Amino acid sequence: MSYAIIRTGGKQFRAEPGKSLRIPSLLGDAGTAVEFNDVLIGNDGTGVRMGVPTLSGAKVTGEIVKHGLEDKIIVFKFKRRKNYARKQGHRQKFTEVRINEITLG
């Protein structure tokens, strides 16, 4: 089973062919092809290859499935005895990407 660890949006994700990932929001419409060149670790079924810090020539290609919003989180700030309380909600945007191919170069 081949997989790769990619970095996008300041986070790291494990990508496998045929799987879908929810990553921080990317530009592009649904159906658009995307390519990730920031591959940190790769496994082609025979052995693990690690980059220093990235694998040269390695890339992961995928296709944008949809855009959306994560579940709402509540940000609540409070200082006792000071009559201070603030409540705010936040929904992070995401892009769902289906991984098509992993090339380790």
Image (spheres, rainbow, N blue to C red):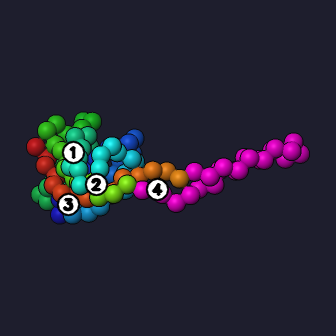
Q: Nearer the viewer, mark 3 or mark 2?
A: 2
- Magenta part of the chain: 68-90
Query: Which mark sits nearer the N-terminus, 4 or 2?
Result: 2
Query: Which mark sits nearer the N-terminus, 1 or 3?
Result: 3
Indicate whether 53 appears above or below 18. Answer: above
Q: Position of residue 70 (x, y in %)?
A: 48, 57
Check if mark 4's residue and mark 3's residue have beta carbons within 8 Å. Answer: no
Q: CA distance from mark 4 to mark 3?
A: 24 Å
Q: Nearer the viewer, mark 4 or mark 3?
A: 4
Q: CA distance from mark 2 to mark 1?
A: 14 Å
Query: Which mark sits nearer the N-terminus, 3 or 2?
Result: 3
Q: Which residue is mark 3?
A: 17
Depth order, front residue of 86/19: 86
Q: Amino acid at mark 1?
A: Glu
Quarter holding residue 45: bottom left
Q: Amino acid at mark 2?
A: Ala
Check if mark 1's residue and mark 3's residue have beta carbons within 8 Å. Answer: no
Local crowd at mark 2 within 10 Å, few (<14), some, or many (≥20)?
A: some
Q: Which residue is mark 2?
A: 30
Specify whether residue 17 is in view: yes
**Dot 3: what SS?**
loop
Q: Is residue 89 magenta?
A: yes
Q: Amino acid at mark 4?
A: Leu
**Dot 1: what SS?**
strand
The disc at residue 35 is 1
Q: Position of residue 10 (x, y in %)?
A: 40, 41
Q: How many marks?
A: 4
Check if mark 4's residue and mark 1's residue have beta carbons within 8 Å. Answer: no
Q: Which residue occupies 57% across, 51% down?
A: 90
Query: Which mark sits nearer the N-terminus, 4 or 1?
Result: 1
Q: CA distance from mark 4 to mark 1?
A: 22 Å
